[in-house]
Image: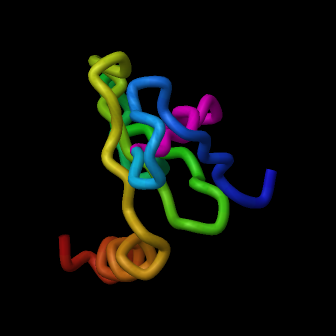
Amino acid sequence: MNELQFRKSSYSGHDENCVEVAPIPSNFRKSSYSGAGQDCVEVAPLPSTGAAVRDSKHPDVGYLAFPAAEWEAFLAAARRGVL
């Protein structure tokens, strides 16, 4: 999968202006920046767009999606110890 696969939401009307949805990533993994405990941050790649981040304690609540440029900037800051 190289791109997110969007489809028209079943809740959208018949006009051209509609809501599109894409499936939630299923390949979340524990972030290497998380501690050794069970509660951690999980991350999943969003093909061609960036990354998704969620809380392992509440995965059903959803995730935050970050565009590629913002995700790379965040990782660079984390590697420098700025965060």
Q: Quadrant of the C terminus?
A: bottom left
Q: Residue at x 47, y 53 (%)?
A: 16
Question: Residue 54: which quarter of the image?
Answer: top left
In this picture, residue 41 sits left or right of residue 25: left
Q: Residue at x 20, y 79 (%)?
A: 82
Dominant secondary structure, magenta: loop
Q: How is the image coloured?
A: rainbow
Q: Is residue 56 above or below residue 24?
A: above
On the image, the x and y values in percent for residue 55 come to 30, 31
Question: Residue 38: which quarter of the image?
Answer: top left
Q: Residue at x 43, y 81 (%)?
A: 69
Q: Nearer the viewer, residue 42 or 6?
A: 6
Can you name the residue that lies furthest to the front here?
Answer: 15
Question: Residue 47: which quarter of the image?
Answer: bottom right
On the image, the x and y values in percent for residue 33 come to 39, 53
In this picture, residue 19 sits left or right of residue 2: left
On the image, the x and y values in percent for residue 63 come to 34, 38
Q: Nearer the viewer, residue 12 or 33?
A: 12
Can you name the residue that lies furthest to the left here?
Answer: 83
Q: Nearer the viewer, residue 41 or 11?
A: 11
Q: Is residue 20 magenta?
A: yes
Q: Is residue 24 magenta?
A: yes
Can you name the residue that lies furthest to the right here?
Answer: 1
The number of callouts visible is 0
In this picture, residue 4 sits left or right of residue 77: right
Question: Bounds of the magenta span?
Answer: 19-30
Q: Residue at x 54, y 39 (%)?
A: 8
